Image (cartoon, grey):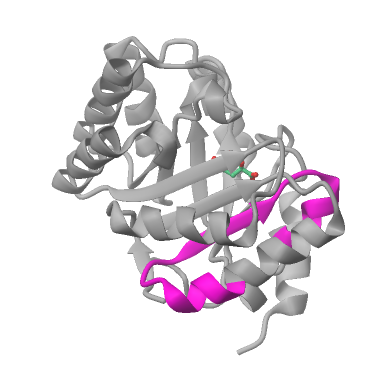
Amino acid sequence: MKVCTVRGIHIGEGKPKVCLPIVGKNEKEIIQQFQSFQGLPYDVIELRIDFYQEIRNSSSLKSVLQKLRSMTDLPILLTYRSSREGGQMQLSDEEYQTFVKQACESQCIDLIDIELMSGNTLVFQLVEIAHQNDIKVVMSNHDFDKTPCFSDMMNRLEQMEILGADICKLAVMPITYKDVITLLNMTLEMSHKLERPIVTMAMGKIGVISRITGELTGSSMTFASAGKISAPGQMNVIDMQVLLEAIHHD
Ligand SMILES: O=C1C[C@@](O)(C(=O)O)C[C@@H](O)[C@@H]1O
């Protein structure tokens, strides 16, 4: 597995990197949430821009990205999560493309989430826009209803790599503990098979274990919370670091 380095953070090496999501609906809330992270042990900020009410307004979008950039040197991952995949809103294909272009051209972000299921042509175009602007692509897929079978999950991660992902991310919903074990096994296998770092998680209460075992299975990043969660099962960032450290070995 190759390492993806962003602003000196090596994703895919050592302990899984901890990402904290911001879920503010306006600029004030976004900045307040970011400020509340001060002093906490984390590596990457995720701005969940589907929560932001002004996502379609290019000057507001630019302004919020510029403000956040001016406040931190940590890597910023910008994520628009469609309602199809558990997010807060649905952009049309055209709007999605415009949004990705504006965000990447702002030069205020380091990584951008692109949903695998947006359709190959659109995904290809979005990856191109990101890479032209030196932004890394976290390609993602979410199943909030179930855990797909082993081979389906493998295929999705493989497809992400083929489509140009720099990091391949899969989040699923387990119904049973067996689903969680299936995800962990699949992660272990794919972390050896793929060239790109992978990120996986089983959401919800019964999937919590999957958020701390990345060093064993090869999942290179994990999402925690500092107050507001962006997905079910995220644990507090301080508890998370204690557990990651307990598992960590050289
Ligand atoms: O894709 C992911 C992972 C996630 O869904 C989780 O389960 O922690 C949280 C989201 O904010 C992020 O974009």
Task: Name the residue rendered at 56%, 16% in the picture.
Answer: 25
Q: Which quadrant would residue 79 be assigned to in this image?
A: top left
Residue 84 on the magenta segment: no
Q: Quadrant of residue 132?
A: top left
Q: Is residue 175 above or below residue 106?
A: below
Give percent across and percent down for residue 147.
69, 49
Asked if the magenta segment contains residue 198, the reply would be yes
Q: Residue furthest bottom?
A: 250
| 48 on left or right of 57 | right
Splitting the image into four quadrants, where does ligand 1 fall?
Answer: top right
Question: Residue 121, image x and y in percent?
Answer: 24, 35
Can residue 72 be seen from the camera position used here? no
Q: Residue furthest left?
A: 132
Residue at position x 41%, y 71% in the image: 194
The residue shown at (61%, 68%) is: 186
Span shown in magenta: 188-210
Q: Nearer the viewer, residue 218 or 186?
A: 186
Residue depicted at x 47% and y 57%: 155
Quadrant of the snapshot with the C terminus: bottom right
- Where is residue 105, by image quadrant? top left
Along the viewing direction, whichever of 169 and 60 lies nearer the viewer = 169
